[in-house]
Structure formats: structure tokens, C-alpha cells
Image (cartoon, coloured by chain):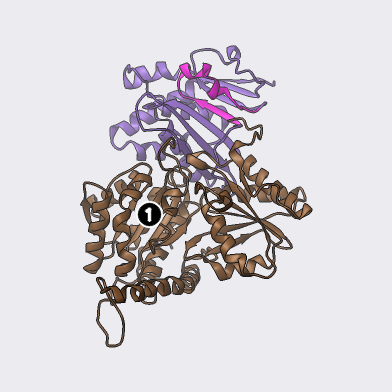
Chain colours: A purple, B brown
Amino acid sequence: MIEIRFHGMGGQGAVMGALALAEAAFSEGKYAQKIPVYGGMRRGGDVTVFLRLDDKPIRRTSGIYEPDALVVLDPTLLNVAEVRKGLKQRGTAILNVNNNPEEVDLGVPLSKIATVDATGISAEVFGPRAIPITNTIMLGAVSRATGWVKLESLRGPILHMFPGRMGEVNFEACTRGYNEVRVWECSK
Amino acid sequence: MGIIRMLEGNEAAAWGAKLARAEVVPAYPITPQTELISTIASFIANGEMKAQYIKVEGEHTAMAAAIGASAAGARVFTASASQGIVFMEEALWMPPGMRLPIVMCMVNRAMAPIGGLRPDHNDSLLQRDTGWIQFYCENSQEILDTVIQAYKVGEDKRVYLPVAVCYDGYFASATATPTSIPDQKEVDDYLPPYKHEMYNLMPGEFRTIRGFPQNIAKARYEVQKATEKAKGVIEEVDKSYGEIFGRYYDGALEEYACDGIEAVFMTMGSMTGTARDVIDEIQAEGKKVGLIKMRCFRPFPTEELRKLAKKYKVIGIVDRNTSYGSASGSGIVAMEVARALYSLDDRPLLLNFHVGLGGSDVTMRQIRYIADKVLDAYQTGKAEDETDWVELKDLGEVM
């Protein structure tokens, strides 16, 4: 079982992003589970989503406190203690930050760090916003960095979530995340 | 054959109501139930579901409308949570006495104050005396299946009672997992249209909505009898559902990994899934502790529990609720279990754990702690604490 924790701000699409990843994994024949944890639904508030992927049915419903992987949708969240907390040694981090992965220090030795300037891509694709939409961009980065799901598997769930033209725009954003992510295999 | 989709618990409940062909849905939104009724509203708006959605100004009116529609012969579905359920409570006493098989999802959420939007079971357990049958579900699949089963149980002529399908906010309501959606035709065959025959007056049979004082005890005893009869109907319905759809829930109580085991603990709701993983882990370490899932709290499965109790030397009861100042400071489930087992000559040792209160998460470590305490009690023959507030213990959790 892979246990992944998503962190974002309300409005960035962490819940929908995690669900799209779960749907993509499910479409590849894996079992997936998404649990969102938020307070009142509002823009700008912190959002945490737990995502589990496995080859067999997933039964536990508890939160993920010692994740195998972190997906962080906003650079401002990287310094928040709650976001870094519990990440497993030899784990994986996929981050929206405009740095090289070699420059990132999350306080534990990791096996893989991937960075992508999702905020920059978001401004180009969706236009500049106070709270940039980064979820689908991060999904592309996750796909490339981890291989948990194929890029093509994300297409269906994304088109389903955003009917009409926005679906294509979001899949384009996802593809840019896939192409522009920088992956560092730290242990090599 | 149906299809399998990623469904959140709330969506699964909406699918259950749709497949059961609920005809009237009076409802008022409240977190964490909102996605359930918004899904139903979009089913109706899309023309996928033929039902009357009644927008009301509050939960009390939602139940009043449900009562009226059900008494007029419609199949009725509604849902609420937390303060909403309690606001509706005055009206909740009517359907059992009127013998109206309304189905309602109670999406568990802790009561104020302090509690956020996440679950404990006090909101639905507060309604335990009203006469509603109560199921507690573990995940999306069980929610969908139980909504359909709930109509089959409630509308059975031997029962004619309303049924509450309870499940935890967030950890079940917003958790998406692969869920099998049965075929509409198979559900139609299993659950024919509702026909309320209770109000056909028959000579020699006692029925009343409003009675004289001398009849009230009799009317209430009829509800009590129907509740008792529901036990057998719940078993039957679960079995016949399993034969068609391939999924069984073992009626009111399920034993998990209990072969050759003499020490168990009992859970309700979404924490059961977490407990299954913990049981597998600790049994692999050689610790002999098993799990009982309580699926049906009303009617309370007294006879079944007594049968199980003969096999077990220790039963730990995990209560996701509080009853301040109760007997021994026990949770609500523990008090019921104690009463049910008191008349046995050879009683198991009972332990009681409070966990997940005010909506906090029930973690793997907490469940492991509970399993260890149950094992300690089994080995020493005595309980360290009568009632253990697990969340106050430092378990070295990274949270």
C-alpha cells in the first residue's frame, strides 16, 4: 500500500486532484481510496487529503500521519510544520516550488524529490490568480515522478471533472506538469 | 450485472435511494450530509430519478414532510446530521408510532460544542429510544447496500418501522472507494414498489395513530414487538440480498478473524475497517485478539450477543460517544452490552474504551492500544480501567 498526503489551500483543487488520481489508479485496475479532511469549505483555508493506492481492497479509514509520499500544491505550505510532519524516511515528495529538487530540504532523507513550478504554469494556462489552481499540473508531475499512474489514465478523470473546454485546458496543464517536473533520485 | 465506480459514502447513499426508487425526498442540507442530498437533487434534475424533492426551511419540517408523504403511501428518503437530527427529534418520534417505513441517512457528526464537523455517534445514538431501526455502516459499499436493505426491512409487514442508516461523516461520507452499483432491474425485482397495508383496518387487530390513554401502552408494545421481529427480518433480508448481489454483512453482528480466539473488541462504523487491518497485523505477531463489528444497534442484537459471549472471556467495547455521568462512566454501547449479558451465568469480562470523540480520527495506534488492553485483561483476568479514554493516552502518535 502507498499512503500519500496532499496539502493545498482551499480553491487549489487538492480534493479534486486526489480524486482524479484515485480514479486514474482505479481505471488501471488498482484499488484506491480518497479521504478529504477540511474544516468548513472555504477558499484559502488549509486542505489535507489522504490518498491510498493498493493492489488489494483498502479497508482502513484512518488518516495518514506517516505518509510514504507528500504532494504539496503551494510553495507557501512547505514551511508549515504540519505539512512536513511524519513524512517517512526514504519517502517521496512532489512539490510545487520553483527550485531544483537538489535544493529542497524537508528534514528527512528521502529517496525521491520532484519539483515543478506549478504556480508559474498555472498563471500561463489559467491566468494569474490570488490562489493559483495547481491540482491538475501536480497530477502530471506525480505521474512522471512516480509512475503510480500513466499520464493517459489521468485524461478520463480530468475530462469528467471539468466538462467542456476546461477539461482539455486542464489536461494540457497536467501534461505540462508531466513534461516540466524535475525529478531527483536522491539515493543514487 | 452492475458497474463499479469510485463513490464517496454520500454518493453511495444517493445511489441506494435512487435504486430503491424513493419517490419523495424532503431534505435540508447540513455538513457532512450535503453531498448526499445534492447528488439526489442532480439525479432528479437530470431526469435519472423520478422523485419529488421538497426543499424545506429546516430539518423539523423535513421530517414532518417525510411523515406526511409516507402516510400517503410514498416511499420516502431523507438525511441529516448532528444538530440537524436533534432539531428534527420531536418529529422523529412519530414515524415508529405511525408505523411509517421512512429511510433516513444519519451522517454522523459530533454535537456542539467544541466538535468540528467530523464524526462521533452521539447524534444518532441520542435517537435510540425513538423506535427507529439503526444500522451503522463501514464504507461506501455497505452504505449503498444497506439503504436498499433498509427499505426491505422497514416495509416488511412484520416490521413497518422507519430505518436509520448511520455512517461517519468524512471517514465514510467523503471517502471515495470502488463501489459496486447493482443493476436497476435486479433491485426492482428484489424490492417491489411500496404498498402500505398497515392502515387497512382489520377486525381484531389493533392499530392507532392517536389513541385514548388506555390504548397507549398497547400501541407502544406493538412497536416494541415489531422491533423484536425486525431482528429476524434483518437476518433474512441480508441473506436474500447476498444471494442476489453477492455481498453479505452477517446481519446484526459480524465476527472478524475470531477462530480459536477468546478475547475480542467490538467496533461500530468506519473505524471497523481500520480495526480489520490492525487485527491482521497483530495476529501475524501472534497476539490472539479478534474483532466484532456491531452493524445493527436497534434492535439491539441481545440473543446473538449472548451466543457470542459464551465463546469469549473478554469483550472490549469501543464507544465513539459519551454519556456524561452514566453508570461506570460507560459509553452507550457498553451500557447496552452489559445489560444484555448480565443475565448470563458465566459472563465475560467487559472493558470499555472511549475513542474518536468530537470527531477526532480513530488511528491504527489507538486500535492497537485497545487490542493490547484486551489481551492484558485476558491474560491477567482483570480490567485495569473500567472505562478508558484512549485519546488522553500518549501513544507517541505523530499527528
Q: Would you say B335 lies left or right of B39 here?
A: right
Q: Would you say B387 lies left or right of B282 here?
A: left
Q: Nearer the viewer, residue B36 or B215?
A: B215
Q: Would you say B231 lies left or right of B390 here?
A: left
| Image x and y of residue B115, in percent | 44, 37
Q: Which region of the structure is painted magenta?
A: A67-88
Q: Where does label 1 land, which residue? A: B105
Residue at left offset 36%, top offset 71%: B220
Against B192, is A54 above or below? above
Residue B134 among those drawn in magenta: no
Give the residue at the far bottom of this rendering: B203
Label 1: state its secondary structure. strand
Residue at left offset 48%, top offset 40%: B359
Q: Is residue A25 in sight in this rendering?
A: no
Q: Would you say B375 lies left or right of B81 here?
A: right
Against B38, is B185 above or below? below
Mark 1 nearby-residue class (10 Å; few <14, some 14–19, many ≥20): many
Residue A70 among those drawn in magenta: yes
The chain under label 1 reads: B
Find residue B184 and report its image quarter.
bottom left
| Image x and y of residue B155, in percent | 35, 71
| Image x and y of residue A173, in percent | 39, 25
